[in-house]
Image (cartoon, rainbow, N blue to C red):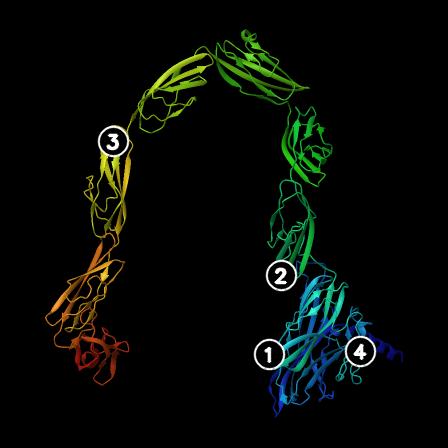
Amino acid sequence: MKKCIVLTLFLFAFLHSNAEHLKGGWIQYDYLGDGSVANSSRYRITVRQYLSCNSSQRQRDSTIFLGIFNSSTGALVGNVHTIPLTGFEFQRNDNKDPCITGDVNICFIVDRYVLDIELPNIDAGYTLAVQRCCRIAGIVNVSGNSSEIGVTYSNTIPGFINGENYAKNSSPVFAQKDAVLICFKAPFKFDFGATDADGDRIEYVFCDGLTGGSTSSSSGGGPGVGAKPNPPSGPPYANFLYQFPFDGNNPMSGTVTINPTTGLITGIAPIFTGDYIVAVCAMEFRNNVLIGTTRKEIHIKVADCSLSAAALKPAYITCDGFTLSFQNESTASVNSYLWDFGVTNSVTDISTEPTPTFTYKDTGIYQLKLKVTNTGGCQDSATAPVRIFPGFKPNFSVTGTCFLNNYQFKDLTQTAYGVVDSWKWNFGDLNTTADTAKSKDSTWKYSNPVATTVKLVVTNSKGCIDSISKPFIVRDKPSLNLAFKDTLICSIDTLPLIANIVTGAINWTVSNLPNRSRILNANTPNPSVFPRDTTKYFVTLNDNGCINTDTVTVNVLQFINVELGADSTICTTDIIKLKPITDALSFKWTASSGELVSSVKFPSVKPLVNTVYYLTANLGYCQARDSIRINTVPYPKVNIGMDTSICFGSRIVLQGSMIAASFRWSPTNSLANTNSLNPIAGPSKTTQYTLTVSDTLGCPKPVSDTVLVTVVPAILVNVGKDTAVLPNQPLQLLAAGNINGSYNWLPITGLNNTNSANPIAILNEQVDSILYKVRLTAEGGCYGEDEIKVRVFTTGPDILVPSGFTPNGDGKNDLLKPFTVGISKINYFQVYNRWGELVFATTQLGVGWDGSYNNKPQASGTYVFQVEGVDYLGKKVYKKGTSVLIR
């Protein structure tokens, strides 16, 4: 007895374990055609059952029990069908969407059971049902313990409605898009859409979830009981009880709706996380008649996650101007942006750009808002304050001498709004971390010389914060900078020595004993000296024990010289640099031509006439003078005339002239007589000719001039091949050229218009033949010509066919074709071989036979032809005869 109890408890535990993993399912059927007996149909029935991905193999059904019921009576039709597991698939949402934060994964196992069946067509149609226990525990919108509530998957196969048979039908097929992550209190979209193979119209509504199997007894018990009722109970099926305020039409929240046309569920997710049962009925209409309803039930998980598609900095501030640039700080994939820059009573302070820039018109604090929609359709928003207070400029100064003494740091920050209210110094002392201060002005003593950077971070009462960094050298001695360290003076001059210092005591000493008394103010940074010969001056700076020294050498000259060199010659308008040799330090230039010359040592001048340049050079009171003559000679001259144009094939004489000693032309390949200033040019294309001249008498630099000879392209005109006409037969002459221009025909005999491209010629019997010439003239006078010979036959309209032809490809008599006189068109031209086979036929004038048939050369011999044409008066002309093919 105890063993039996243990076994019963084990089975109950097994069934209960099985029960807690179902997450929905639905039934689909497809019409396969007529059945094997009259008035029957074949269907493929597919049952999909959703389970949690952590379901073990023993918790999944290896078989299910399908009941098929009469939709009117609810009676079971035939036997229950046991369907083995056919296959399965996984549906996952691994929280890869960067718009969503939170460690939430969604995963379904979708077990699939497939059965092919044949059913008789009955008036009431059929209801398909599979029942199972149980759902997962803790479903939010279910009243009671959801782990003890079963489920019924059902669908309907229509029968006869209003006397019409609808059995030949396939049910709608739902899209398998169920592993969707929804974050609580966030906008979402969930696609419950389906497709219909028959093209029927589908309407979608929320509907009730149905109860099914239970934990009351084991599988295989009485009708409609057990975890897997065998057989399932018949329709109608009971709805499970929803937890208030939810029901079948409101399964999640009052804002969640389903589009009746598309099946798209949208709205704001509930505030409570967990699984929600959502059942959707796809109602199938054909010709506005409801023929069936496919129900799909699925668990939608509302997770503890959030959308992070919109992210801003905690605050924005500009303290230097009114313009700020913004960007979404989230790395989520975003489809659209809407920025509101927070200007009160404004409708233009918005942007849809991903990275907008906005200029505020006034100072103040604004509320920035960003609203985004990501590529998955989710929406998110973020806000941040924007502070506009320009005119905040951090700055500071540093004074000090060397590492032995304190350095003084003084804040020089300026602010236009509010007051500076905090300071943070970092003095850049690499030997300690205590080199900071928060006072407005501060001091710091470094332990050794170093090259470092001092940084100051400042804020003001308006929320501005900024920093400034300055490179800084802590010296081993005080700063001592000399304006010069080696200079030159005249023996009768006095020179001020210049030392730049910050602070400290300074003293100058003299190396040369006779000159020690020739210094004034030796204890100042800028003493005056007047040595009689070259002397070194030593300077010492002492700033609170920091010592620095340096030296200045003063070279003394008793007199100076200046040398400008020999006279020179340049080409007129050229520039030359004057280069005196002297120890002087100041210069005054004058020119005989009145030209103004810069007071530098090496001026650049541009004499236009022969000019003498005078230099007065000074080293203090020592002075020297010199001069130089610059002669100018003119450049050689050349002229080649204006650009011109010639006709193709024409020549032109170039008109060169020069004042020079020699010349050369280029290019020369289209010139004749290039040893002349007037060569003959005959270019075949537009060419630029250059004449370069040189002079041996004056300026040696070559000078060039160019002329562009534009060649008008060859003018081509074509009037076709020679022809023949009958007396008084109108002949349309057709001239065509490669340009637009004017036409002229000669002679005028028989022509109705000699200035037309296409005149009509009418010749009488007195004319045997005539040669017409047409000229096409372009703008500028270039022209082209062509001729056509017209013969006049007095014998009347005729068709002439040669008695023989030689198709050997030599271009002479290669084709057998009719020659016409007074014929306006050919009705047919046909050639037959000796066996009466048609080997060639055409209806086109000027087209002939090349001696081949089916792309094979025909043998030499006699061939029969016949031809019929219509003359220019509309009368038929017929000829028949033979012609010999000669190879």
Circle 2/circle 3 CB separation < 8 Å? no
| Mark 1: amino acid | Ala
- In the displayed structure image, the side of residue 212 where residue 858 appears, left or right: left
Labels 3 and 4: the sequence-earlier one: 4
Which residue is the site of mark 1? 197
Q: Which of marks 2 and 4 is in front?
A: 2
Instruction: Specify the label residue 695 is tagged with.
Output: 3
Of residues 513 and 255, which is closer to you in this image? 255
- Which quarter of the picture shows residue 409? top right
- Determine crowd level at label 2: few under 14, some 14-19, many 20+ residues with C-alpha closer than 10 A: some
- Which quarter of the picture shows residue 141? bottom right
Q: Is residue 24 above or below residue 628?
A: below
Pick the quarter of the image with the N terminus.
Answer: bottom right
Please state the total of marks drawn on the protein image: 4
Labels 2 and 1: the sequence-earlier one: 1
| Mark 3: amino acid | Asp
Q: x%, y% of residue 855? A: 28, 76
Labels 4 and 1: the sequence-earlier one: 1
Which residue is the site of mark 2? 375
Which residue is the site of mark 4? 214
- Determine crowd level at label 4: few under 14, some 14-19, many 20+ residues with C-alpha closer than 10 A: many
- In the displayed structure image, the side of residue 849 where residue 796 appears, left or right: left
| Mark 2: amino acid | Thr
The answer for how far apart the CA atoms under marks 2 and 4 are is 43 Å
